[in-house]
Image (cartoon, grey):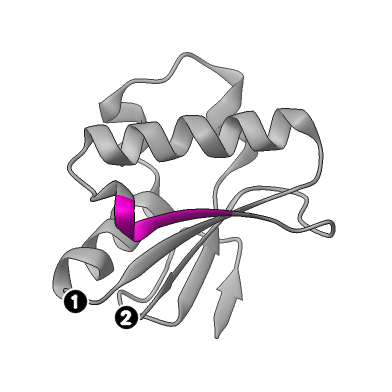
Amino acid sequence: MLVFSAAILCSFPGTAAELAPELWDRPRSAQVVMAQAAVRQAVAAYQANSAARIMIVHGPRQEAQLQAEELRAWLVALAVDGARLQLRADPLAAVLRLEVSE
């Protein structure tokens, strides 16, 4: 699995990327969320494979869980099937991470 925190994410299942922490420093809209490379590319990988699932990995703090839940809501609003989205707490996660898998 490829995991990194830069702006490039391969659009294939089994990949992951971290969202920029700056996303949470300003008001969000669908346009702002989709401007995130990790989101765009995770959604592209999801759309390219009918078996793909998106996992939103978040840290253990309440703020991280709330951010993950908000991101999930944005993805559902952007036509990602909620049944194919999952949240998972990771005690070592410092920022939100999107993982695409089958």
Residue at 32% from the left image edge and 41% from the top image edge: 75
Q: Is 84 one of the magenta-colored residues?
A: yes
Q: Quadrant of the N terminus?
A: bottom right
- In front of the other: 16 or 80: 80
Q: Of the residues tagged 1 and 2, which is closer to the observer?
A: 1
- In front of the other: 87 or 14: 87
The residue indicated by pointer 2 is: 12
Q: Is 63 one of the magenta-colored residues?
A: no
* Above or below, 20 relative to 24: below
Q: Percent x, y for residue 33? A: 36, 34
* Above or below, 15 relative to 42: below
Instruction: Please tell me whether the stretch drawn in magenta is mainly helix, strand or loop.
Output: strand
Residue at 28% from the left image edge and 39% from the top image edge: 76
Local secondary structure at mark 1: loop
For badge 1, the amino acid type reads Asn
For badge 2, the amino acid type reads Phe
Local secondary structure at mark 2: loop
Residue at 24% from the left image edge and 77% from the top image edge: 51
* Above or below, 84 relative to 10: above
* Above or below, 40 relative to 70: below
Locate residue 85 relative to residue 76 in the image: left or right.
Answer: right
The residue indicated by pointer 1 is: 49
Of marks 1 and 2, which one's residue comes earlier in the chain? Answer: 2
